[in-house]
Image (tube, rainbow, N blue to C red):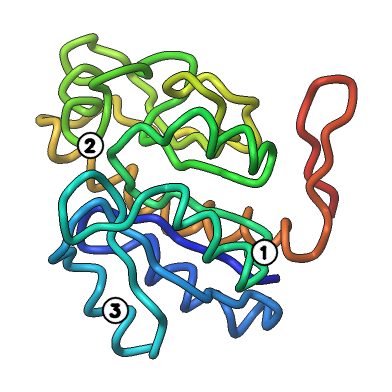
């Protein structure tokens, strides 16, 4: 399956997907897309000889319309947002309906929505005094963090002393659950049934 991965940061989840290819060999990451021109994750892409592009309104970036044309040429089948911090245009989301997935560092629908990403999420979870956090993989729809939930895994944070501790525990789970879900898509084992997402063994 030909995959595009969107990133904004250092790309640790991208690396986890690439490392997972030895288990599901049909994972084929064809292109890395960022909202930045100097994204740290581009270094990972170079190591693996993967094409990189920057998308957005900056002069040196390409538009989403052009990106869509490139995806059509390549034959991209799945788009994975692995720490991508920008809202994707509605037209692009609609074109790739049920083919764009995102990873969120909390248990949606709690601690989601506009402005809730990265340490903002972990700070909010810590201040809430919640004892459990976790990871959510979900489909993208036109709103922030409101698409159908594909998979979730909880993380015990009952004894943490800082938001940074939450972030570390959650990231460890992200690196396991995201590649697993991508692998299930590649194997054709993710289905929508009765308005719920089911992952088959």
Name the quadrant of the N terminus.
bottom right
Tag 2 and tag 3, C-beta contact below 8 Å: no
**Do the CB atoms of the residues marked 2 and 1 lie less than 8 Å apart?**
no
Marks 1 and 3 in Cβ contact (< 8 Å): no
Using a 10 Å C-alpha cutoff, classify the residue at mark 2 as few (fewer than 14 neighbours), some (14 to 19) or many (20 or more): some
Q: Which residue is mark 3?
A: 44
Closer to viewer: mark 1 or mark 3: 3
Which residue is more in the foreground, 44 or 106? Answer: 44
Please name the residue shown 47% across and 76% down the image.
18
Q: Which mark is residue 183?
A: 1
Comparing marks 2 and 3, which lies closer to the viewer? 3
Q: Earlier in the sequence, mark 2 or mark 1?
A: 2
Q: Mark 2 sits on what residue? A: 118
Identify the element where label 2 is drawn.
helix
Q: CA distance from mark 2 to mark 1?
A: 24 Å
In which quadrant of the rendered view does residue 115 lie? top left
Vertical placement of residue 35 versus 95, above or below: below
Where residue 147 appears, as percent x and y from the top left, is 58, 24
Give percent across and percent down for residue 130.
Answer: 31, 14
The answer to which quarter of the image holds residue 179 is bottom right
Q: Which secondary structure, mark 1?
A: helix
> Which one is in front, 197 or 79?
79
Looking at the image, residue 127 sits to the left or right of residue 151; the answer is left
Task: Examine the rendered structure and indicate whether residue 176 appears above or below residue 116.
Answer: below
* Vertical order, 91 against 177 (above or below): above
**Marks 2 and 3, the one that precedes in the sequence:** 3
């Amino acid at each position: 399956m030909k995959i595009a991965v969107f990133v904004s940061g250092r790309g640790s989840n991208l690396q986890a997907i690439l490392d997972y290819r030895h288990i599901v060999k049909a994972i084929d990451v064809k292109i890395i897309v960022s909202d930045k021109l100097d994204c740290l994750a581009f270094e990972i892409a170079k190591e693996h000889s993967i094409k990189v592009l920057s998308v957005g309104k900056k002069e040196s970036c390409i538009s989403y319309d052009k990106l869509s044309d490139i995806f059509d040429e390549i034959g991209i089948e799945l788009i994975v947002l692995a720490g991508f911090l920008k809202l994707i245009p509605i037209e692009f989301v609609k074109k790739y309906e049920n083919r764009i997935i995102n990873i969120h560092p909390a248990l949606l629908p709690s601690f989601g929505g506009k402005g809730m990403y990265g340490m903002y999420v972990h700070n909010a979870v810590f201040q809430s005094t919640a004892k459990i956090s976790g990871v959510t993989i979900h489909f993208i729809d036109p709103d922030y963090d409101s698409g159908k939930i594909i998979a979730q895994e909880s993380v015990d944070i009952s004894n943490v002393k800082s938001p940074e501790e939450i972030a570390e525990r959650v990231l460890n789970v992200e690196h396991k659950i995201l590649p697993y879900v991508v692998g299930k898509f590649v194997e054709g084992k993710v289905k929508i049934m009765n308005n719920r997402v089911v992952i088959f063994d």
